[in-house]
Image: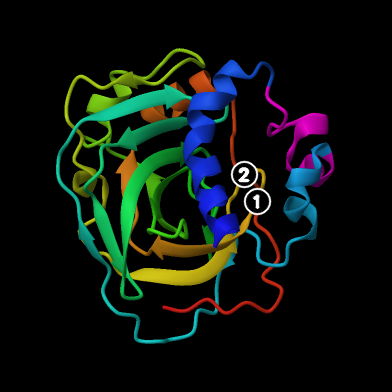
Amino acid sequence: MRHSTLLAAGLLLCAHASWAAGPAQWGYEGAQGPAHWGGLDPGFAACAEGRNQSPVDIRSAVEAGLPPLRTRYAAGPATIVDNGHTIQVDFAPGGVLELDGDAFELKQVHFHAPGENTIDGRSFPFEAHFVHADAKGALAVIGVMYETGAASEALAPIWAELPQGPGPARPLAQPVDAARLLPASMDYYRYSGSLTTPPCSEGVRWLVLKAPLTVSAEQVAAFQRIVGGPNNRPVQPLNGRLIVR
């Protein structure tokens, strides 16, 4: 339990700490890239040794009659930060995902371009990860895929305030309703995985929505200019894990 609590706390605090800690200890290219994460720090060992790593290629999903996802989100104040690896929006308390008989509070959403999980080998240009934690620190992540197309009206107010470099979190001018960032259909795939960034800790419940949204090429380009290029980890071996739908 203590490990899970520390995992959640570390994930949620890293956005506010990494910008102030000097040069990042990991990245997405070269000697600091994903292939080397496991050797950069003893605390990152799971990135190389873990057997339930994320992201994955979602294919051959088993029909399991999954219950509907139930979320209770509402518009509220939020902050935005460039943590040196992604753009992250932190939500005020109150948003809830009901899962496995427990309440998981919505903590933050962050973004990857290109997307990280793939579906039947198909990569998406953009992906959002909605991170939730229960009272014991266990994590559940809703993944939302984006196709290139019409600009996302829901993302537009956030993109209007994108930070231009790493720094402390600052309030967004407008309240953010996380529900508007989700597709109308909440059908999903589920698997057991990990954080997709160091320390790559496992035990994360992944819920990847089947229905993609659209984002404009200009919105993706604006994001990548700020984060400095692609920020996606390659897909990881399933190692016998089941993906259910």
Location of residue 169 with respect to 7 vertically, above or below: above
Task: Kindly identify which numbered label has been placed on residue 73.
Answer: none
Asked if residue 108 shows in the view, the reply is yes
Residue 226 position in % (x across, y down): 50, 19
Check the image and name the residue furthest to the front.
Answer: 2
- On whether residue 38 falls in the magenta region, the answer is yes
**Viewed as shown, does residue 77 lie left or right of 164?**
left
Location of residue 90 with respect to 211 vertically, above or below: above
Element type at mark 2: loop
Q: If the image is split into quadrants, where does the C terminus sit?
A: bottom left
Q: Distance between the residues labelled 1 and 2?
A: 5 Å
Between 68 and 231, the residue placed more toward the observer is: 68
Element type at mark 1: loop
Residue annotated with mark 2: 197
Q: Residue at x 47, y 79 (%)?
A: 244
**Viewed as shown, does residue 59 lie left or right of 27?**
left
Task: Give the residues drawn in magenta, as a range.
Answer: 24-39
Location of residue 43 with respect to 53 vertically, above or below: above
In which quadrant of the rendered view does residue 229 lie?
Answer: top right
The residue under label 1 is which amino acid type? Answer: Cys
Location of residue 144 with respect to 173 vertically, above or below: below
Residue annotated with mark 1: 200
Residue 149 position in % (x across, y down): 33, 40
